[in-house]
Amino acid sequence: MKKICYVIIPVMLIVVLNSCAPVYMCGDAKPAKQPSGWGKRLKSVVNERDRLCTDLAAKEKENEGLKKNLADLTDQFNVLTTKNNDLQKKYESLVNMSLSQTDKLSKALLAKSEELDAKEKLLSEREKTLEEMNEVIARQDSITKSLNNILRNALLGFNSDELSVEIKNGKVYVSMSDKLLFKSGSSAVESKGKEALKLLGGVLDKNVDIDILVEGHTDNVPIKTSVYKDNWDLSVARATSIVRILAVDYKIAPTRMTASGKGEFFPKAGNDTPEGRAKNRRTEIILSPKLDELMKLLNM
């Protein structure tokens, strides 16, 4: 403190020296008795010196406190700087990780989007195929109904116990009894049966997109002749006879026809009555629109 007082007081000494008064330093004791002539100026200088020394001590104490605060703030700043650097590193790491995850998610989303597009395309193709199939089926149903009406009109001259025409499962069934077609135990077609086949052949010749299945059926009464071993053998022979007549006499393409013998195994009625056995002795001519177009769609 005395050193600082040496710096501040010289300015005041200039005034004091003019009166040749002695100078006291900060902390020096005042003399018991002041020399004469100092007057009021010396007293004023001493009081100012004391005030300045007191202010200086307060400023030095304040300065020490500020230094300590500065040191504390510097330490806090360093700690916060370290934390900030750590947080910055973590942030950058998270950003990089986020970008990596975003890239992965983007790729996964793109893959799913492409997969969805492929499935939508496949679904669209299947819907188109289904529409085409429905159109084909509708056209075939229309052909079947039209064929059914034509055959009913063409075969009106026959009794219901001799011949019937109906639609089942999208096909036209022309069922002819053995009363109309055959004598008992024979596969030779009778004249009235040939009349029915002639009318049928005329309709089939004009509708070339119709497939023909001829099925022979019998009752369960056993038969065994020199020509036929059993009812099954007889049913096959009867179906073959009708196919041959349609092919030879009415020029129906053999590739359109199939002959099948069912024997006694697919009865329409019970075989325990004469009426039931009569219904079972029949030949069914099953007519169905060609399925070539539909099969093409199914195999796409």
Image (tube, rainbow, N blue to C red):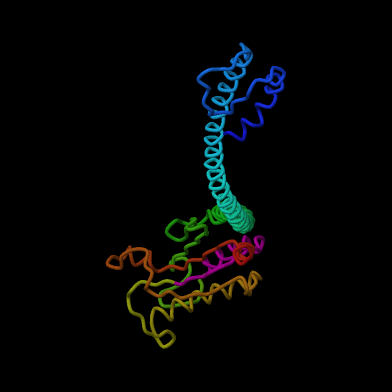
Q: Tell me the residue at 54%/25% (across/down).
A: 54
Magenta stretch contains residue 193: yes
Q: Tell me the residue at 52%/55% (across/down).
A: 157
Quarter of the picture holding the N terminus? top right
**Magenta residues?**
191-216
**x%, y% of residue 21?**
65, 20
**x%, y% of residue 122?**
62, 58
The reply to whether residue 139 is visible in this rendering is no
Q: Tell me the residue at 52%/75% (across/down).
A: 259
The rendered magenta stretch, by its main secondary structure, is classed as: helix
**x%, y% of residue 218?**
39, 72
The reply to whether residue 65 is visible in this rendering is yes
Left/right placement of residue 274 relative to residue 28 reads: left
Q: Is residue 26 above or below residue 218?
A: above
Q: Can you name the residue that lies furthest to the bottom here?
A: 226
Left/right placement of residue 209 relative to residue 215 reads: right
Left/right placement of residue 215 relative to residue 300 reads: left
